[in-house]
Amino acid sequence: MAYTIRVITLVLYLVPFVAAVGQDKCYQIRDKYSGEPICFATLKLCSEGKTMNILSDKEGKFCTDVSQPVYLEISGMGYKTLSDTLTSEYDNQIELIPDLLDIEEVVITGQVTPRRCDQSVYKVTLLSKKDIEHKAAVNLSGLLMNELNINLMQQNVLGRTISIRGLGGEHIKILYNGMPVSGRQLGIIDLDQIGIHHANHIEIIEGPLSVIYGSNALGGAINIITQAAAGKKLKAEAGINYETAGIYNMNLNLFYGLKKHCFGLNMARNFFAGFNPDKNSRFDVWKPKLQYMPGVNYAYRGNKIQADVYVDFLHEELRDKDSLSRDNLYESADDRYYFTKRLNLGLSIGYRFSPVSAITAQAGFSVYNRAKNSYHINLVDLEKHLITDPSMHDTTNFRMISGRLAHTFRLKNLEIITGTDMNYENGYGKRLSGEKSIGDYALFSSFIWDILSGLQIQPGLRVSYNTRYKPPLIYSFNLKYNLAGLKLRASVANGFRTPSLKELYMEFLDQNHRVFGNQNLKAETAHNYNISVSYIHAAHRFQYDFSGDFFLVRVKNKIDFLFDYDQSGKLKSATYFNLPGSLYQTKGIALNTGISYKDLIHVKTGIALTAISSPGNLEKIDFSPDVTAKIQYNVHRKYLSLVAYYKYTGKKYFYKNNIGDATTAAYISKEYTDPYHNVDISLNGRFLSQDLRISAGCRNLLNNITVFSTASASIHGVNNSQMPVGWGRTFFIRVNYILKSKSS
Amino acid sequence: MKEYLFNILAIAFLSVSCFEEDQRVPPYPGLVSTIEYDITFYQGYFDFETNSVVKTHHRDEWDLAFGCDARSWHIKVNSGNELFVYRSALIDLNEPYNISGNEEWQYDNPTGYPDSSAVGTWCDTSVFPYLSHNKVYILAQKGVQGYSEYLRFQMFSSDSSCYLLQYLKPGETVLKQLDVLKADSFNFTYYNFKEEEQKNLEPLKGSYDIVFMPYYDLVYGIVAFPMPYLVRGALLNPDGTEACMYENLNFENIDYEQVLSAKFVDRQNIIGWDWKDVSIDFAGGTATYNVKTNRVYLLKSVEGNYFSLRFLSYTLDGKYGFPRFEFRPVLP
């Protein structure tokens, strides 16, 4: 019974088992600075043509026969990999240096083959499981909140949208284990609906990835990599999270490994009670919602074949409650309920023909369904009925089928990937005026060539066919040069984005929106230039790093809104259109520095200046600054840390295209949103042999709720308005518990 | 024990993390009425004493209305159904006339004063029975393509019992004579030329106080110049209802003192349509309304009783066209 409860409650951590090896000499692996033993480090021992993989034990010890020199490679989570030759004279205390910058982590987004973060020709930002833990994040928006160059905006019932380097959510590809996620409302995917409770890590690439991922990847990609089960063990992990804003989250992850087979089951329930600064109002600025996110996955790890299958589902109920006013006699309300369902189904099979040749086939099926139902509720007798007017209800459906087949081949200093990529999206619903579809089929190829020691280039090409548009030839050229600790990266690429089905066909009419699609839209094309330099230096117990990035993006035929207003200056409707006769440009620089002392203190700071040009006038630009900082103090390297995040979101400028009236011609108005500071702090502890993990802290310490914005500027001047940026200062606590099964 | 603790915590979490249920609220304390027919298409006659809509009919039930008072010569045109009058220079109904687009199309001034009507003073009002100036009036209906002739008519006379006129419909060559009989118990009697039928659409003239209906008025602020526009509003019963209007008067505190100092007028559109703001989307063909709840009216009913009145909303089940208003008797 007790064991059953342990399984249900779930908290079991993978305890790798220790392989028995020769007992001739024993060693202990320790942290170089703290001296603490490193348990379960992976060791690869090669001697006389034989290779053996073992793990260090709970005390960081392992034993092996060293009568002959043994080639040794040790990697431990959070440590730099050590390669050396082990002889009988070798000291029995082996020290690993903490990897303070995550550069040893392996990334896959946009890569020919998985490779270490620092070896990628792309500059990849990696957010690890530890980052998720420190931020107590349950979804993508919570995780990206304080990241440099990334801005989130709350869009009423549509949720939270993202912009990276001044390019909006429609230019950012959201990937789930490498396969695109479908279901964009007004061009955006609600990041609150992208759960990360079972994520292993998240990879972010700022910059174009159109060669590999096609449309929507002009501005970058965010790839959520879920955890893969491993080991012959049952592992369970349960977590609960409470935040004083009325957030109650629970999640449960189960993994079971049986030889080469791994099974996973995950489930999350997220609840948010909604928020309005006016506590007496029934209406919520931040809508209350309840999410269920179940999922299952299976992985097979054979010698030559690796396979992954996953199914993830989301059901969200969001309530948009009407306010009580004299209009409804303070006794009745028309509430809108939004029900969203997302299904992501994926299959990935990799087959290794030889050590230098492999093929990967991926297939994805993504379903998005959003229904709006309106109810009239009489609050005197609490009688509720569905409003009969059909215009108060609607349903939108999207289905996306994605497929990818890629062959990778390695020749000495050349890695080549060649493949096909197909995406077919189909949508139907009232707002789309029937059933509509668009397909994109492509051949792509890219290779990484180590020309000289430290010099890598990666050209790429994509030829595609689109059922509605004629895409140009997509190319990219990336270069990386290593010089001691200095890494120089440069890239030139073009991109292409076809208008989405919504942008083409949508009719979105309700009390708050009047948005019309435009079937005459042209596809966007873009040119993207990036230069970045990074430097890492480790000296004694200090480690410094610095990086600087410059980017320039020019988008032709950028799809934007054309706003129309009524005589009182209120926004009346918006229509999609291509910015006429000009380029849209964003450019900017970002500087990041980090310093770490032993594994005790980590300080990271960043400053970014991003400029967007006025439509039709590339010379007229406005810079928006962002500043971020992260300070982490490890009271105890393993067991207790204090983390503070700071972000200054500078004054953000944007331009609106407006229709004129009888007295004014069509014009462009410059809008802005006021700057604000945000500070989050958390105290993170690990107890009971790290099985119990508790994070507690304060979010939005400076109590931001709204900032001034001129977003609703009208033809008659400016209607001052407030843009919601948060629900004020809140306190949170997150508890994760891991149970380990006794059998191995 | 740890697992039990975790389970208990999880169950506690589930029990509190649910959508908040609505709490009952007390009913609104005032006397509230809602016109449940869309006043874009229907005319609804409301009586304050009985707090009821005493009669409703569709706006296209009539074309012209004729004053029923024995001495009345007042003719109204149904601008709510997009009918307009052009006072032509013709004197013969059979004389050819094609709408040129330069006509000055008239609609009744919603004040209700007879000399401000679209047809205007069609007769010599100094001599009774009234005899016509014999003008030919072109009655046209406004549509998406512009004005199209509905019919043309020529008044002859009005005496204590009837109106005499003749009319000609487009495509017809034979003139039709028409007697419209006055009905003493009504303010107006109505004629439908399509059905060629006289109708008494109104309730008895002493049985209602205001009528909600569509009609044309000059509206400022839609475009750069004042523009005739189809509005939806409330007009007073011309048989004696009077009203006056206040901005920002505390509705709750209105008492008989207020009545004594009030300057009541019989201008029929004193309430009118202006108790709401409208934002018009020409391209989308829609309008957005906000009711001015700070606007308060004092009303003397046709029966001589006083009421305070304010509008609360213009929406029913999410659709516009349904006025909701609150009123209270103001007693000495």
Image: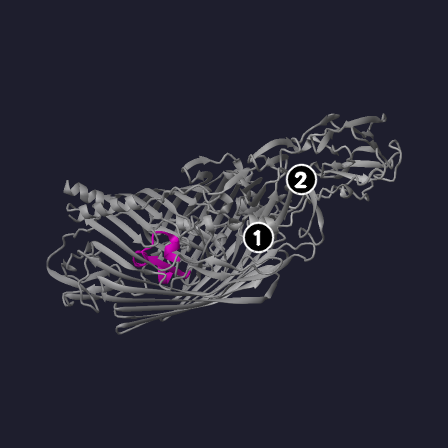
Q: Horizontal placement of A37 versus B190: left or right?
A: left
Residue B314 falls in image quadrant: top right
- Seen as rendered, the residue at the extreme left is A24
What residue type is disc 2 on?
A: Gly
Q: Considering depth in this image, is A466 or A516 the residue closer to the camera?
A: A516
Q: Position of residue A486 (x, y in %)?
A: 38, 70
Q: Considering depth in this image, is B301 or A368 the residue closer to the camera?
A: B301
Dot 1 falls on a residue whose secondary structure is strand
The residue carrying mark 2 is B240
Dot 2 falls on a residue whose secondary structure is loop
Q: Chain of mark 1?
A: A
Q: Horizontal placement of A187 versus A534: left or right?
A: right
What residue type is disc 1 on?
A: Phe
The residue carrying mark 1 is A561
Per the model, the C-alpha gap separating discs 2 and 1 is 54 Å
Magenta highlight range? A116-144
